[in-house]
Amino acid sequence: MGIKKNVSQLNVSKRCREHGLSLWQCPQFLFLVMGVIIILTSVATYAIGIRYVENPAVIALIVLFLTTILFIIAFAIIQGFEKLAEANRLKSEFISVVSHQLRTPLSNLKWTIELLMSGRLGKIEEEQVECFGILKENNDRMAELISDLLTVSRLEQRTLPPKKREASLGELVQGLISEFQPFFRASNIQIEFSVQNDLPKIYLDPFQVRLVIENLLDNAIRYIKDKGEIKIKLERKEKHIYFEIKDNGVGIPKEDQKYIFQKFFRSENVLKYQTQGSGLGLYIAKAITEKSGGKIGFESEENKGSTFWLMLPIQ
């Protein structure tokens, strides 16, 4: 068992997967890289030493001393990185476990509240309906947060592999727009969708890409105040399908724009409107888009609106 464990420790790619990190972020791989650098540095020091120092023993001591110092520094740095990577893995596992455990009671609470509000268990007064409505709204917010946390955890642990198939991005977007129509009407928002004719189908994971578009649409609705409009454009740009969503909402302050794709970040100007949200939607959108081989970006001006775009490869 001990031998197998030691061999497992030497499997760099496996250790990287356990931490949910790419190769260039993995402490074990970085340690190997730094080991190669130390060896090359030692060889270079020796080559320089034999040109300027006559005594071979002195050269050997210099090389040995330099190699030891570099090795100690590298080991200390990598140990620190490994502890951070392990803490990150444990955090993701904790979030995943907690999210799974909370989904069931929240679902039960949702159906119980809806059953009570329906009046099938007895007549309820108007004041009680209002209280149940508040409970239902807060339960829905908690369920949304749990869903986002679970998605983030799966993305970080790489347990949400894409299930790609040939699909039409135009049909996917049109379907989402139809589903969001009640929210557009309730928020007094005009929606405009323009799509280029004869767009090719692309290989994508419909569930994951749908999640990206859904988050962008949801943000556009949330951050439009009073009467507004949303313009969506879908077209081909060389070897990519280009999606754009433009709104005339509150916009993003310039000083906040560099943080917009970070987890849990929300701009100060949306907080003053008491707009609901977990601050995870754009992080999820960026992670999924990049995993799909695409790019995502935006342009925004405070009090004038935002334009978010993404490009997905056709092949």
Image (cartoon, rainbow, N blue to C red):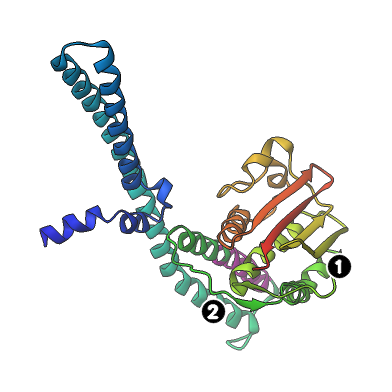
Instruction: Name the residue carrying label 2.
Output: 112
Judge from the rendering whether residue 62 lies leftward or rightward of residue 219; answer left or right. left
> Tag 1: residue type?
Ser
The answer to which image quadrant residue 165 occupies is bottom right
- Mark 2 and mark 1 in contact? Answer it, CB < 8 Å: no
Q: Residue at x 12, y 58 (%)?
A: 3
* Mark positioned earlier in the residue sequence (2 or 1): 2
Is residue 130 highlighted in magenta?
yes
To which quarter of the image does residue 278 belong? bottom right
Q: In this view, does 215 lie to the left or right of 49?
A: right
Q: Quadrant of the C terminus?
A: bottom right
Local secondary structure at mark 2: helix
Q: What element carries label 1?
A: strand
Which residue occupies the foreground of this view, 48 or 284?
A: 48
Q: Which of the pair 139/180 is nearer the observer? A: 180
Number of marks: 2
| Residue 137 % position (x, y) | 63, 66
Q: Which of marks 2 and 1 is in front?
A: 1
Q: Residue at x 82, y 63 (%)?
A: 233
Three-letter code for the amino acid on which mark 2 is drawn:
Thr
User: Magenta part of the protein: which range?
Assistant: 127-143
Q: At 84% from the left edge and 46% from the top edge, which residue is drawn?
A: 304
How far across and down, in percent of the image, does residue 18 sit?
A: 34, 58
Residue furthest left in the image: 2
**x and y percent of residue 168 in the render?**
71, 76
Residue 167 percent coordinates (x, y): 67, 77
Q: How far is mark 2 from mark 1, CA to CA? A: 42 Å
Instruction: Name the foreground residue: 249 vs 39.
Output: 39
Up the image or down, 46 lies above or below 311; here it is: above
Residue located beneath label 1 in the image: 194
Location of residue 198 with respect to 268 vertically, above or below:
below
Q: Residues within 10 Å of mark 2 (few under 14, many from 20)?
A: few
